[in-house]
C-alpha cells in the first residue's frame, strides 16, 4: 500500500494557489488597480475564498 504524498506537486499551477491571489489582491489595493483587484477576487471565489473589505474606523489604531 502506498501513501499519497502530502506535499504539493512542484509543477502545480500557481493560478490555483489562493495565497498568490491574495498577493495580487493586496498589490492591486495598494496601487488602486480596481480591475486587477476584481480579477483577484473572482479567482479567490473560484478557489472557494470570499473576501470582504471594510473601511477602517476613524482614528483606528492600525492607521498607516
Image: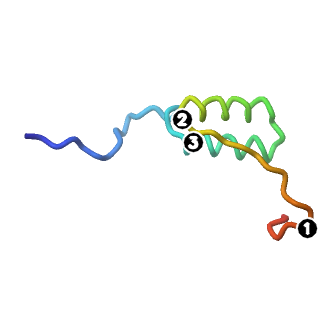
Q: Nearer the viewer, residue 14 or 63?
A: 63
Q: Determine whether, in the image, residue 5 is placed left or right of residue 29.
A: left
Q: Determine whether, in the image, residue 27 is placed left or right of residue 48.
A: right
- Residue 20: numbered disc: 3
- Which residue is tagged 2? 48
Q: How far across and how far down the image is residue 16, in percent?
A: 49, 33
Asked if marks 3 and 2 touch (Cβ < 8 Å), the reply is no
Look at the numbered disc 2 and give the secondary structure of its residue: loop
- Which residue is tagged 1? 59
Nearer to us: label 3 or label 2: 2
First-in-chain label (1 vs 2): 2
Q: Is residue 57 above or below residue 33?
A: below
Q: How is the image coloured?
A: rainbow
Q: Label 3 crowding class (10 Å Cα cut-off): few <14, some 14-19, many 20+?
A: few
Q: Label 2 crowding class (10 Å Cα cut-off): few <14, some 14-19, many 20+?
A: few
Q: How far across and how far down the image is residue 32, in percent?
A: 84, 40
Quarter occupied by the N terminus:
top left
Cα separation between marks 1 and 2: 33 Å
Where is residue 42, by image quadrant?
top right
Look at the numbered disc 3 and give the secondary structure of its residue: helix
Asked if marks 1 and 2 touch (Cβ < 8 Å), the reply is no
Q: Determine whether, in the image, residue 43 is placed left or right of residue 64.
A: left
Direction left: furthest residue = 1
Where is residue 59, by image quadrant?
bottom right
Cα separation between marks 1 and 3: 31 Å
Q: How far across and how far down the image is residue 18, in percent?
A: 54, 41
Seen at 75% across and 40% down, the residue is 28
- Residue 21: numbered disc: none
First-in-chain label (3 vs 2): 3
Seen at 29% across and 46% down, the residue is 6
Amino acid at each position: 500500500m502506498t501513501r499519497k504524498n502530502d506535499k504539493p506537486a512542484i509543477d502545480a499551477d500557481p493560478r490555483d494557489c489562493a495565497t498568490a491571489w491574495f498577493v495580487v489582491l493586496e498589490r492591486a489595493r495598494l496601487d488602486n488597480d480596481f480591475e486587477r483587484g476584481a480579477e483577484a477576487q473572482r479567482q479567490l471565489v473560484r478557489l472557494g475564498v470570499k473576501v470582504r473589505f471594510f473601511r477602517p474606523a476613524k482614528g483606528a489604531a492600525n492607521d498607516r
